Amino acid sequence: MRYRRMPIEIEAPEGFGYDKIDCNLSESSVTDQRLVDLGLDLGDLLLYYGDHRGKPELRELIAKDAGISTDEVMITSGAATALFILATSLLEKGDHLVVAKTNYATNIETPRAIGADISFLELKFESGFELDIAELDALITDKTKLVSLTYPHNPTGVLISEEKLKAIVELVERKGTILMMDETYREMSFSRKLPVAATLSESVVSISSMSKSFGLPGIRIGWISTRNKALMEIFLAAKEQICITNSVVDEEIAFRFLQRKEPLFAPIKEAIARNFAILRNFMGGQDLLEWVEPNGGCVCFPRIRKDIMLDMKRFHDILLNTYGTYIGRGHWFEEDDRYLRIGYSWDKSEKLEKGLKNILRSIDEARLF
C-alpha cells in the first residue's frame, strides 16, 4: 500500500482551524449534533468487546429499514472504514475497477494506493453529471473486479432513477463484476429514496453511515450491506484484522438515535429544505456561477462561468483570508478550481447567505479586466 494524504484532508477545516472561519461552506454533512440534545444516558453501558459484526439490535434496525436480513449488515467504524474494507478485500495490485468521477476522494485514492488500474466514468457538467450506461458498459472488461458509484452523488448532489439503478445492476450481473454503491446521502434524497442497492442483487454491496445525514460524524459508525454471504465473510475477516469490533459507546448512540429516527431526523430535513431554498434563490439571482441543480444530499458543485477571466489563486485567497469563507475546492475532486463544492446545511442559514455573497464579492475582486 502506497499511502499519500489527500488534498481534501490536508485542507480540511479541522486542520485550518474553525476559529479562523466565519462562513463554513466546505462541510459535506448536516450540522453536527450535541450528545446532550439527543437525551441519552449511557451511565449503565458495559464497556466490553462487542459483537464482531456489530450490535445485533443496531444491525436489525438498519436491516429492517433496508429490507434485508440482520446477517446481511455489518457495522464499521464509519463509511470510510467500510470503503477501505471493500477496496482492500476485492482489489489487488493490477486489478481493474471503474469509478464514476467526480467522486469522493477515498473512492479513488484507496484503489490507487493498492496499485489497482482505474478507468473513470466521467460525469460531465455539460450533460448534467448524468451517468451514461453505454459508457459504463464499454469501460467494464472481463478483468473488472469492481464498479464504484455514489448516489445521491457527492459532490454534485445529482441522483439517478430507480430504473437506471436497476439497469446498472443488470449490467454488472451480466458482466460478472461487483457494484459498490455508496449510499451515504440516501436519507437526504429530495424525492422518493432509491432502494438500498444491495437488496437488488448478490452482485451489489451498499455502504452508508451516521455521519452525513444525521450529523453524527463523531461516533464513527457506518455499515456494509450485502446479500452475498461469501463476500460478507471476507469483509468480516478484514474488519477483525483492522479493529476487531467497533466502539460499543458509538454503536449504542447510533442504536438509540435510529430507535427515534423519525422525530430526530425531521428537524434535519426541515433545515436542509430551508437552506436549499436559500441556495436556489441565490443561484437564480446572479450570473457569475452556473450549476446543475442537485436533487439530493446537502452539497452542490457549481462552477465559475468559463467566460469570466479570473485569477483563481487570488479568488481563493480573498474568499478565505479576506472574507473568512471556506468552500471545497475543485482540486479536492481532481477538477478545475473553478468548481466549488458548497455544503449548504452545516453552518447556520445566515452564514450560508453571507458566505454565498462573499463568493460573488471574491469573484469580482479577482477578475482580470
Image (spheres, rainbow, N blue to C red):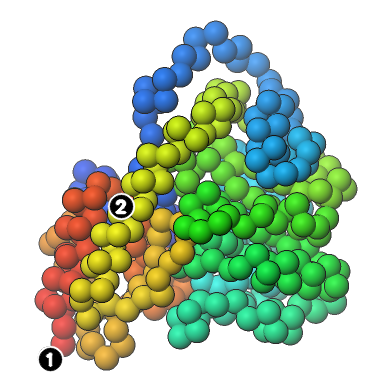
Q: Is residue 135 above or below residue 349?
A: below
Residue picked out by circle 2: 274
- Circle 1 packing at 10 Å, graded few (<14), some (14-19), many (20+), is few
Q: Nearer the viewer, residue 298 or 180?
A: 298
Which residue is rendered at x = 84% and y = 73% of the image? 175
As helix, strand or loop, the secondary structure at mark 2 comes to: helix
Return the mark for residue 358. Answer: none
Residue 254 percent coordinates (x, y): 55, 30
**Quadrant the N terminus occupies:** bottom right
Q: Is residue 195 above or below residue 134?
A: above
Say which of marks 1 and 2 sits in front: 2
Q: Earlier in the sequence, mark 1 or mark 2?
A: 2
Q: Is residue 308 left or right of residue 99?
A: left
Residue 91 percent coordinates (x, y): 76, 61
Q: Amino acid at mark 2?
A: Arg
Residue 81 visible at all? yes
Residue positioned most to the top: 44
Residue 313 visible at all? no
Which residue is rendered at x = 50% and y = 84% of the image? 127
Q: Amino acid at mark 1?
A: Phe
Q: Is residue 324 left or right of residue 35?
A: left
**Quadrant the C terminus occupies:** bottom left
As helix, strand or loop, the secondary structure at mark 1 comes to: loop
Residue picked out by circle 1: 369
Which residue is rendered at x = 60% and y = 72% of the image? 100
Residue 304 percent coordinates (x, y): 29, 79
State how far apart marks 1 and 2 are (Cα).
37 Å
Q: Is residue 25 above or below residue 268?
A: below
Q: Is residue 182 left or right of residue 211?
A: right
Q: Is residue 72 above or below residue 146?
A: above
Which residue is rendered at x = 30% and y = 52% of the image? 274
| Quadrant housing residue 294 | bottom left
